[in-house]
Image (cartoon, rainbow, N blue to C red):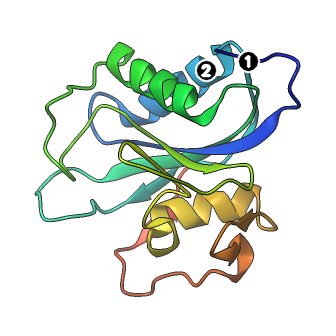
Amino acid sequence: MIDERRDPITAFVGIGSNLSEPIQQIKDAIELLDDLPGCHVTRHSSIYRSAPFGPVEQPDFMNAVAELATAVPPDILLACLQEIERAQGRSPDRERWGPRVIDLDLLVYGDETIDLPDLQVPHPGISERNFVLLPLREIAPQLVIPGLGQVIGLKIDEQHPQISRIE
């Protein structure tokens, strides 16, 4: 349920794709996020290209981060993100760290820390993934991630495969 009376929370969503025209998939996802009731995309990062994360051989990923002003509670927002993934053709039985049409992750939800079986916020591994940190640093360098500190102060992993801003 959306409480339109509540003050909007600032949330950040990680967006990734490496199948079916990934750049367009990211742009479509940003539009769909902005269309969600109780949500407004206030800004988004550039699109970055990065080598895939994990052991599966696959094409490079395109990644971005969107900042939302939202009145939607975090569990419902997660369900909305999953619905956008399905609408864009993501298969529910995908391989872990495998190729995907779209991947939407709730990275940060205000100053909340959430640890539920289906929802962890801040998103686990956020501080070790350049494909999240660089786009996040672009749009919100002063953001304080609960338990981690300011984005600008988080160390970029020099061992991680190259990442480059493309659009």
Residue at position x 57%, y 18% from top? 32
Q: Quick one: 155 or 106, which is closer to the camera?
A: 106
> For the residue labelled by badge 1, is the local secondary structure a helix, a strand or a loop?
loop
> Could you tell me how far apart the alpha carbons at marks 2 and 1 are, in whole angstroms?
14 Å
The amino acid on which the numbered mark 1 sits, given as a three-letter code, is Gly
Relative horizontal placement of residue 95, taking residue 23 as reference (left or right): left
Height in image: 107 above or below 74?
below
User: Viewer-proximal residue, 61 or 141?
Assistant: 141
Residue at label 1? 38
Amino acid type for the residue under numbered disc 2: Glu
The N terminus, quarter of image = top right
Q: Residue 75: where, in percent of width, then height?
A: 53, 32
Q: Is 31 on the left or on the right of 127, as rendered? A: right
Q: Residue at the far front: name it.
A: 116
Res. 28 mark: none
Q: Inspect this view and state whether residue 11 appears.
A: yes
| Residue displayed at 49% across by 32% down | 78
**Which circle's residue, 2 or 1, is located before the other in the chain?**
2
Residue beneath disc 2: 31
Residue 166 in the image, given as x and y percentages of width and height: 53, 52
* 107 sits to left or right of 158: right
Q: From this viewpoint, is residue 167 visible? A: no
Left or right, 101 with respect to 105, comes to left
Disc 1 crowd rating (10 Å Cα; few below 14, some 14-19, many 20+) is: some
Instruction: Estimate the x, y position of residue 84 in percent, counting from the top left.
Output: 44, 20
**Between residues 154 and 27, which one lies in front from this camera angle?**
154
Q: Residue at x 65, y 30 (%)?
A: 73
Residue 44's place in the image compared with 161, above or below, is above
Q: Secondary structure at mark 2?
A: helix
Q: Residue at x 11, y 57 (%)?
A: 57
Q: Nearer the viewer, mark 2 or mark 1?
A: 1
> How many marks do you count on the picture?
2
